[in-house]
Image (cartoon, rainbow, N blue to C red):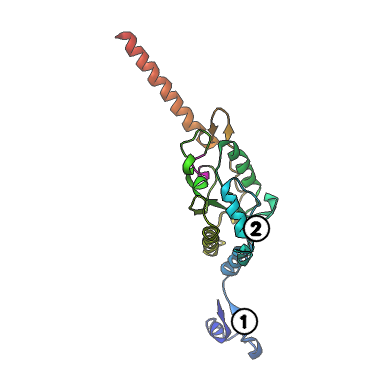
Amino acid sequence: MTNGKSGLEGLQNPDIPIPEELQSTIAVTSLDRIYNWSRSKSMWPLLFGLACCAIEMIASAASRYDISRFGMEVMRASPRQADLLIISGTVTKKMVVPIVRIYNQMPEPKYVLAMGACASGGGPFKEGYNVVSGIDKYIPVDVYVPGCPPTPQALLNGFITLQKKIESQSIRTVPWYRSGESEAVPLPVLGPDIIDPRQAELIRQQAQRAVAERAAEASSEAEA
């Protein structure tokens, strides 16, 4: 962004005279920059927490850290009014289904911040039977904040990182301005284990291959 007379000189258009009294009040910039500036400085996080990381998220909104300095203090109770989903805590397989449903209910543009080791990769419960090894296996994640749990300062750094990412985007390439409706993420199927419908065909092929291998081993043992 350029202010004052130097910005007017960059236009190099003598056919459009600018009054002298306006030359010190005109700013020359791009549509992408002013659009991204307004979005990055007015993020509305969803009022949503899962485990101990949520306590640190709450602390970041209190008076000591005050996320309102970044324009993110308006936490919304409805996903239809939010554009930032903070996954703050351990993601169990039972919770993946409502998380994906909440993500689909958020309007575009929307962003996801994985807060803590559990949301990013499973954390200390990665080998557990009931914990997902990272929420990015089901919904796209824009920023990862490491820690167990991360401090409010780390979360603020994640906010700043997200703002920088938003400011680098272009209206011509962002997915929500392309023609056609955006596709919703299919809801995982929760049964004996959780299944991502996008990987159902791969799981089916692996199961058929395992059955064929066991049948071949059984036939070879019978012949022996």
Within 10 Å of disc 2 (Cα), the crowding (few <14, some 14-19, many 20+) is many
Q: Nearer the viewer, residue 13 or 80?
A: 80
**Label 2 vs 1, first from the N-terminus:** 1
Residue 201, relative to residue 11: is it above or below? above
Tag 1 residue: 26
Q: Secondary structure at mark 1?
A: loop
| Discs 2/1, front | 2
Q: Amino acid at mark 1?
A: Ile
State the image coordinates of residue 114 (x, y, percent, origin top left).
Answer: 53, 50
Q: Position of residue 165 (x, y in %)?
A: 52, 61
Which quadrant is the N terminus positioned in? bottom right
The crowd level at tag 1 (other Cα within 10 Å; few <14, some 14-19, many 20+) is: some
Report the residue at 60% width, 48% height from top.
182
Q: Which residue is mark 2?
A: 44
Q: Is residue 186 visible?
A: no
Query: Residue 120, relative to residue 160: is it above or below?
Result: above
Which of 64/47 is in front?
Answer: 64
